[in-house]
Amino acid sequence: IPPLLEEQWSDRDLSCPICLELYTNPVYLPCGHNYCLACINATDASSGEKSLPRCPECREEYSGTETLHKNFKLCGIIEGYRAIALVENLGREPLEVQEQQKELMEANQSSAEVLSVTDKHLFIHRFLLIESQLTEVVTGTVARVLSKEPLNTKRLQDSLRMNDFRAEMGQLLQALIVQLNPLELTFNITTAHPSLLLSNDLRTVKYIGIKQASTDNPERFSTAPQVLCSQSFTSGEHIWVVEVGDQSMWSVGLCYKSVPRRGDHSRLGHNPVSWRLQWKNKKLTACHASSNMALVEKTNQPLRVEVALDYEGGILIFHSTKGCREHLHTFRAVFREPVYPAFSIHSTTCCIVSFRPYVSVVLY
């Protein structure tokens, strides 16, 4: 592994758990695990058609390989890994020009395949811009130097401006590490309404319908059955998933820490410091600053909601991802304070919220 990557990655981090080779055309399953598209296709085919296929690692079911999405960020890591490895090798000792050209053509072809795919994912545009700049540096500068024999190692290093190159790649890889090693969310017990029961590990909350005895805390919600996460976001791009059960009524969104804790204005969306999507009485609505918007009527309740936040971009997007992926609503705002994932359970049925390991939330 090149020095730039050896402290952050190992071969195992970038290898498919099935074929044990570097990922080729990686896709991600709903459970968060990644595989080569060909490998998961082969596994799916061998499992037969009697039941839904399962993840080879955690055994969670998924709808099928036709619903899987390409992991563009992991593609970028792999191509960055290969590109830096090529440059480091060129800097240490000359290689045969023919071998270098072959590696360069393979890297360029793989990058071109990534760039050729159009995807409406919230954060892919920024990544493609960085990847395009990286491809131009590697394919343009390296190819120009390789065309001149004998290979001048010092001239190659100078023309690539290695310090700038390393710094840019380091920033890109650090951003992608966040995506592959996400923050684990936990509930903040001091904010939980007395009718919400939290588990000992603060990863599950249940609506019990009656108020429990609780200490008087100014951070606790006393009007609406709401709870915040302990973790907040002040920058970057983040995704978490909420799974909701049938017959439940819920709200999912974001808020500042300054959100009121009592009175009607403490309800998510009914103040200028919170944004929420709500399913109630078989209707889906979006609300911010008490401006409630009825969304397109849904025949079926969303059962899995993906929440995507771009803090600097001021974008908060909700998608239904159970079955076919469907856009539900987009908020646009200028975030000026730390934002906290926020939840409200206002159902007379049993509703449980719990977290998965990969920054996700489950209500059922």
Image: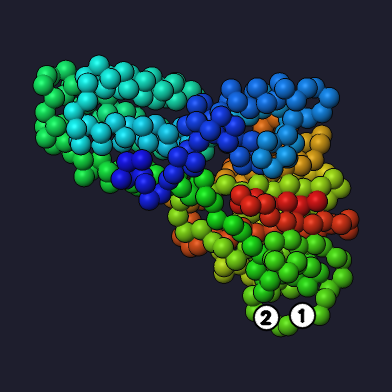
* Residue reaching furthest to the bottom: 216
Which class describes the residues within 10 Å of circle 1: few (<14), some (14-19), or many (20+)?
few
Locate residue 226 relative to residue 330 in the image: left or right: right
- Residue 265 in sight here: no
Q: CA distance from mark 1 to mark 2?
A: 9 Å
- Residue 356 in sight here: yes
Identify residue for label 1. Answer: 214
**What is the three-letter code of the residue carrying label 1?**
Ser
Answer above or below: position of 159 versus 286. above
Q: Secondary structure at mark 2?
A: loop
Q: Secondary structure at mark 1?
A: loop
Task: State which quadrant residue 139 falls in.
Answer: top left
Evaluate if marks 1 and 2 touch, with contact meaning CB atoms under 8 Å apart.
yes
The disc placed on residue 217 is: 2
Task: State which quadrant residue 228 falls in.
Answer: bottom right
Answer above or below: position of 10 versus 22. below
Closer to the camera, 92 or 106?
A: 92
The residue depicted at 59 percent of the width and 57 percent of the height is 184
Closer to the camera, 5 or 250?
A: 5
Query: In x, y percent, where is residue 248?
Result: 83, 51
Query: In x, y percent, where is residue 209?
Result: 87, 66
